Amino acid sequence: MGSFLAYHSGDLDTIPTKGQVSDLLSDYYRYFRFLNDQRGALHFINFKDMIADRKSTIEEIADIIGLLNFEVSNELLEDYDRKMQTAETKKDKSAGSLPNEQKQAYKARVSKLIVADPYFSRCSDLFNSLESDDIDAG
C-alpha cells in the first residue's frame, strides 16, 4: 500500500493525508472483497513465492493455462532482468517497480498512517485469507 501511495503522490518527500490513506484503503478493501467473491474462478499466486522462484512459478502458471511442456530458460529470465533494470532507470524514483532507498524511507514514514486507519485490519484480514489461496491451492 505504501508503494501505491508513493506512485500516486509522485513526491517521496511528502506525507499523504489521512483522507488519502483512507481512500486508498477503502479502494483496496473493495478490491479484496471482489477477489474474495471470485475465489472459485481465480488462481492466486503468492508474490513471495514468485520472487523466490520465478522459473517454477511461471511454469506452474503456464501449466494452469494449458501451455504444455512450457519451460522458462535462465537466459530468458536474465534478459527480462536486464530490460527491467533499463526501464527502471527511466522512471522517477516514486514510480519505480523495484525497491529503492527513497521509496523504502517513504513507506516507513507512511506505515503508521496506514496501520492506524480503520480499514487496515479489514484489508489485512481479507488479504491474508486470499494469500492462503495461492497457486498451490488453485
Image (cartoon, helix red, strand yellow):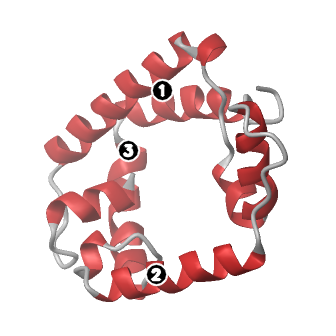
Q: Residue 102's image quarter?
A: bottom left
Label 3–label 1 contact, CB within 8 A: no
Q: Which residue is mark 2?
A: 83
Looking at the rendered structure, the kind of residue marked 1 is Arg
Q: What crowding class fits label 1: few (fewer than 14 Cα within 10 Å), some (14-19), or many (20 or more)?
A: some
Q: Quadrant of the C terminus?
A: top right
Number of residues whose C-alpha sits closer than 10 Å to that of mark 2, classed few (under 14), some (14–19) or many (20 or more):
few
Q: Nearer the viewer, residue 72 or 12?
A: 72
Q: Residue at x 57, y 33 (%)?
A: 127
User: Which mark, by number, is residue 44?
Assistant: none
Q: Is residue 20 left or right of residue 119?
A: left
Q: Nearer the viewer, mark 2 or mark 3?
A: 2
Residue ID for mark 3: 116
Q: Position of residue 74 (x, y in %)?
A: 76, 77
Mark toward the start of the polypeptide (3 vs 1): 3
Q: Amino acid at mark 2?
A: Lys
Q: Is residue 11 left or right of residue 4?
A: left
Q: CA distance from mark 2 to mark 3?
A: 38 Å
Residue at which label 1 appears: 122
- Give percent across and percent down for residue 86: 39, 87
Expressed as whole percent of the image width and height from the top left, the position of residue 15 reads 19, 66
Answer whether labels 2 and 3 touch (C-beta < 8 Å). no
